[in-house]
Image (cartoon, rainbow, N blue to C red):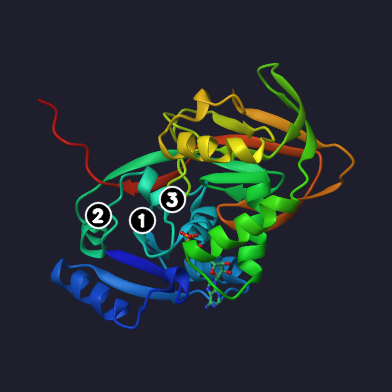
Amino acid sequence: MRQLLFVLNPISGDIDKSELEATITAFCVEHGRQAAFFHTTGEQDQQRLQTELLRHTYDAVFACGGDGTVSLVAGVLAGTSLPLGILPLGSGNGLSKDLGIPQDLPGALRLMWEHTISPLDTLRINNNFSAHLADLGFNALVVERFSAGDTRGPGAYVRIATHEYLAYEPALYRIRTDRGETFEGPAFMVTMANGNTFGSNVVINPDSRLDDGEFEICLIAPFPGTAALGVLYQLYTRDFDASLYTQRLRCRWAEIEVIGQARVLGQLDGEPLELTAPIRAEIIPRSLRVLLPPAPPTA
Ligand SMILES: Nc1ncnc2c1ncn2[C@@H]1O[C@H](COP(=O)(O)OP(=O)(O)OP(=O)(O)O)[C@@H](O)[C@H]1O
């Protein structure tokens, strides 16, 4: 693994990245690697990255940003043999936390020369890519408001969520899966989960794997304000299934209708997106090769 491309998002996580290229280059020189850099602009990044990968040969591509940047790079690499590395430099970094990737820069950079390469599943939602978590309902609305605003960080997210919660009208969903399971009714949130944990550390889908050939639909029913703290507590303590208001369907594909709506707001890996309903979500098994910390030696 000699030629490495680093995809840098200058705005992610509100982190100063003025020294980042120099730090990465110094690491690469020290370990006999060559670094090239690609800067995201927020416009046409996917097409530009695809062109870059056609023009030059790399041995791995590192996403240097948050979940949106990881998703951008993963979507371009999925279905190829080129592995994805992650330098977690966003505000949440949900996927990298689920994968046990060190959250500090030197630790994450170490994966350049000390790693195992694992094939992970990814999600296709209509014709869109998602590596980690996607949803419909309340969280998608908050993510959309958050993206449109000019304040980043967890404080802004909580402020928007509290404000939106008061007036939120849950939609009615009709869901069927390849396993013959069905759901019909109102939901506060419908998450299509390949991974476990949002960047906010909310565990929406505990104890599931990113390489099991399946995903979970995690449903949260509308709940009264008096139950909100209890639901939140369960989400932060990996106890999703314990709530009266939660349910999970495990599947390889699902079709989701939103009653009375042909266009539905969703969020895919933290990026808002309008989707055409009915929505088809399916798992694409082992479609993305990812650099992970080496497995600890067995006793
Ligand atoms: N140069 C740029 N200027 C403005 N926006 C950009 C630029 N490059 C990328 N973006 C936007 O950054 C967003 C992705 O940010 P990313 O998710 O990586 O970081 P984050 O939101 O801080 O972290 P996380 O998702 O982990 O909470 C995308 O919406 C993308 O369009």
Q: Secondary structure at mark 1?
A: strand
Q: Quadrant of the N terminus?
A: bottom left
Quarter of the view holding residue 238? top left
- Sequence order check, earlier mark of 1 and 2: 1
Q: Quadrant of the C terminus?
A: top left
Residue under label 2, please give it.
111
Task: Work out whether 202 lies above or below 107.
Answer: above
Asked if one can make out residue 177 in the rendered structure from this viewpoint, the answer is: yes
**Residue ID at (35%, 78%):** 17
**Residue ID at (67%, 51%):** 165
Amino acid tagged 1? Gly
Asked if one can make out residue 266 in the rendered structure from this viewpoint, the answer is: no
**Residue 66 spot, x, y in % from top left:** 45, 61
Amino acid tagged 2? Leu
- Nearest to viewer (mark 1 / mark 3): 3
**The one of 257 and 162 positioned closer to us in this rendering:** 162
- Sequence order check, earlier mark of 3 and 2: 3
Amino acid tagged 3? Gly
Q: Are marks 1 and 2 in contact (CB under 8 Å)?
A: yes
Task: Work out whether 286 lies above or below 198.
Answer: above
Q: Taking 42 as reference, is 98 left or right?
A: left
